[in-house]
Image (cartoon, rainbow, N blue to C red):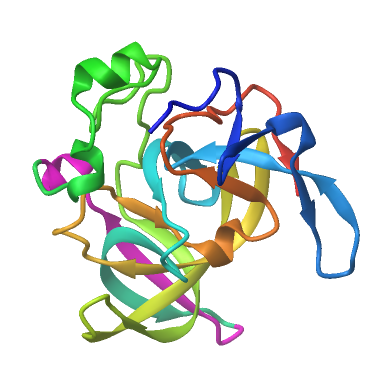
């Protein structure tokens, strides 16, 4: 198999479409430029005081999931339910990464200008709150895994920052101890925003300016 031509773009069949020509069509029919992200990216969750979290962008998963342990639920004076939860450290998942992180050895990642799996950029330090995080509960959802097992998970709605863009998305909370990344962004959160390059990582490291989208 021939290697695709050099340069930035997305391969479709035998052709490589330059990023400058990629477009997304919104449900209302409007068209805008597509934003490109790698299958691993640094994510900020400003509502949870989290910055620099390495996430897996998985278009094969419908929902997003954050590696966390729910501590308690409490109601405020307006009757809203708040979740208090512990963000579990990425180090607890070391060595449990699925096969895609091992497709290329670290040397190959470095040659391609990428960081090896499990290694974050020194310019993007991980920042997490010292105590439990807190977010408004929006409901519970039954999540079915790839092997057919079902699990009832609490859902929060929080702000996500990626590649200079900020938006709100629903995220389930689950103890993802067998997974390789503390945050998984599914296609519902990515839809109409990003195209995911399955062979590249860290294409959208956040610049200093973040815009609501």
Q: Nearer the viewer, residue 70 or 77?
A: 70
Residue 36 visible somewhere in the drawing: yes
Q: Could you tell whether 118 is left or right of 38 in the image?
A: left
Residue 89 visible somewhere in the drawing: no
Instruction: State the residue at coordinates (44%, 75%).
Output: 155
Q: Nearer the viewer, residue 9 or 43?
A: 9
Q: Is residue 85 magenta?
A: yes
Q: Could you tell whether 105 is left or right of 34 in the image?
A: left
Note whether 7 is above or below 97 in the view shown.
above
Q: Nearer the viewer, residue 213 or 74?
A: 213
Give the x, y percent position of residue 105.
18, 25
Q: Is residue 106 magenta?
A: no
Instruction: State the residue at coordinates (38%, 45%).
Output: 55
Q: Could you tell whether 38 is left or right of 98 in the image?
A: right
Figure quadrant of the N terminus: top left
Quadrant assignment, res 68: bottom left
Give the x, y percent position of residue 12.
59, 45
Instruction: State the residue at coordinates (36%, 42%).
Output: 129
Note whether 140 is above or below 65 in the view shown.
below
Q: Which residues are magenta?
A: 78-94
Residue at the far left: name it.
95
Residue at the far front: name it.
1
Quadrant assignment, res 7: top right
Q: How many marks?
A: 0
Note whether 151 is above or below 68 in the view shown.
below
Q: Nearer the viewer, residue 62 or 175?
A: 62
Q: Could you tell whether 55 is left or right of 196 in the image?
A: left
């Amino acid at each position: 198999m021939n290697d695709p031509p050099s340069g930035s773009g997305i391969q479709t069949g035998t052709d490589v479409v330059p990023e400058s020509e990629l477009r997304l069509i919104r449900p209302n029919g409007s068209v805008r430029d597509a934003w490109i992200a790698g299958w691993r990216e640094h994510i900020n969750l400003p509502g949870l005081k989290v910055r620099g979290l390495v996430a897996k962008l998985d278009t094969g998963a419908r929902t997003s999931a954050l590696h966390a342990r729910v501590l308690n639920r409490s109601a405020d004076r307006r009757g809203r339910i708040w979740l208090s939860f512990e963000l579990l450290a990425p180090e607890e998942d070391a060595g449990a990464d699925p096969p895609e992180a091992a497709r290329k050895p670290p040397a190959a990642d470095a040659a391609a200008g990428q960081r090896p799996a499990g290694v974050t950029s020194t310019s993007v330090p991980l920042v997490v709150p010292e105590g439990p995080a807190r977010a408004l509960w929006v409901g519970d959802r039954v999540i079915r895994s790839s092997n057919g097992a079902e699990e009832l998970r609490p859902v929060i709605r929080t702000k996500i920052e990626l590649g200079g863009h900020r938006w709100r998305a629903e995220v389930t909370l689950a103890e993802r101890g067998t997974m390789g990344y503390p945050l998984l962004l599914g296609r519902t959160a990515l839809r109409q925003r990003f195209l995911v390059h399955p062979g590249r990582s860290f294409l959208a490291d956040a610049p200093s300016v973040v815009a609501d989208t």
